[in-house]
Amino acid sequence: MHSLSFWAQPFVSAFIGWFTTWLAFYMLFHPRKPIHIFGLTIQGIFPKRQHIFAQKLGSVVANDLLNAAQIAEKIKDPDQLAAVMPDIEKHIDTFLNTRLKEKMPVISMFVGQGMLEKVKEGLMEEIEIMLPEVIGKYADNLVHKIDVQKMVTDKVAGFSSDKLEEILATVMKREFRLIEGICGVFGFLIGLIQMGLSFVHF
């Protein structure tokens, strides 16, 4: 006749499977600060490797995902420049029809609406010519001033472990629980197998 501990094997194995998986997830972020025990240093993986992770992520983002040259090209994209023209035209309309007359009332006495429209047309033509050149120089200058890799590295290096854990818990909480449950089930099955082997042995 088998003891209670024998029949408890599947449940003990299930708990061990669940607990070790939970502990593995927990140790991604805990303990925050290193703890020294019997000559061993224990610290959460992310807090311990945060600077290395930040450098690697910064390198990947800058080299494979996004860099200053790509940003500059987007800024200089003719479609992007054309998209801002309606806003520029709106501001010119406001300036010629409202603000200019407020600042120089005498203008309204000598300049009619037709003349203002011609002035507006001339300004819009000059802006369409000037804008790509000005924005192009500005964008090219950004390439030399923006260090995407350093920006990402510094941001991630200074990121709070608490905040990152909160984000991951929010996004992947269900997945973490599912993995923990699966490992518990596998542990239970391993316990059943051990019981089966014990029966065969007897």
Image (tube, rainbow, N blue to C red):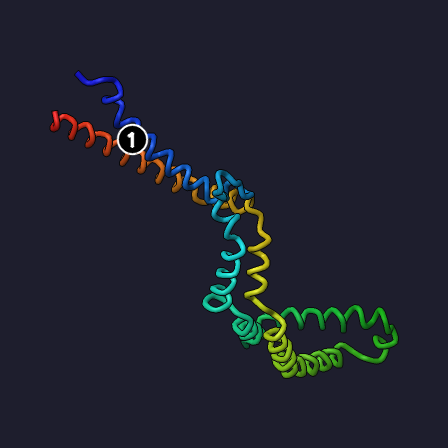
Write the residue at 51% across / 67% down: 62
Write the residue at 81% across / 79% down: 111
Q: Is residue 113 left or right of residue 102?
A: left
Task: Give the structural element (helix, strand or loop) at label 1.
Answer: helix
Which residue of the protein is positioned furthest toward the right in this rendering? 106
Write the residue at 52% across / 42% down: 166
Q: Position of residue 120 (x, y in %)?
A: 71, 78
Write the residue at 41% across / 41% down: 24
Which residue of the protein is positioned furthest toward the front in this rendering? 39
For residue 127, above or below residue 169: below
Disc 1: CA contacts within 10 A as few (<14), some (14-19) or many (>=20): many
Q: Is residue 80 visible?
A: no
Q: Position of residue 68 (x, y in %)?
A: 55, 71
- The amino acid on which the numbered mark 1 sits, given as a three-letter code, is Ser
Residue 96, quarter of the rendered image: bottom right
Q: Which residue is mark 1?
A: 13
Q: Position of residue 113 (x, y in %)?
A: 75, 76
Name the quarter where the C terminus is drawn.
top left
Q: Position of residue 135 (x, y in %)?
A: 63, 77
For residue 116, above or below residue 32: below
For residue 1, above or below residue 126: above
Name the quarter where the N terminus is drawn.
top left
Residue 78, quarter of the rendered image: bottom right
Q: Is residue 65 visible?
A: yes
Q: Is residue 79 left or right of residue 195?
A: right
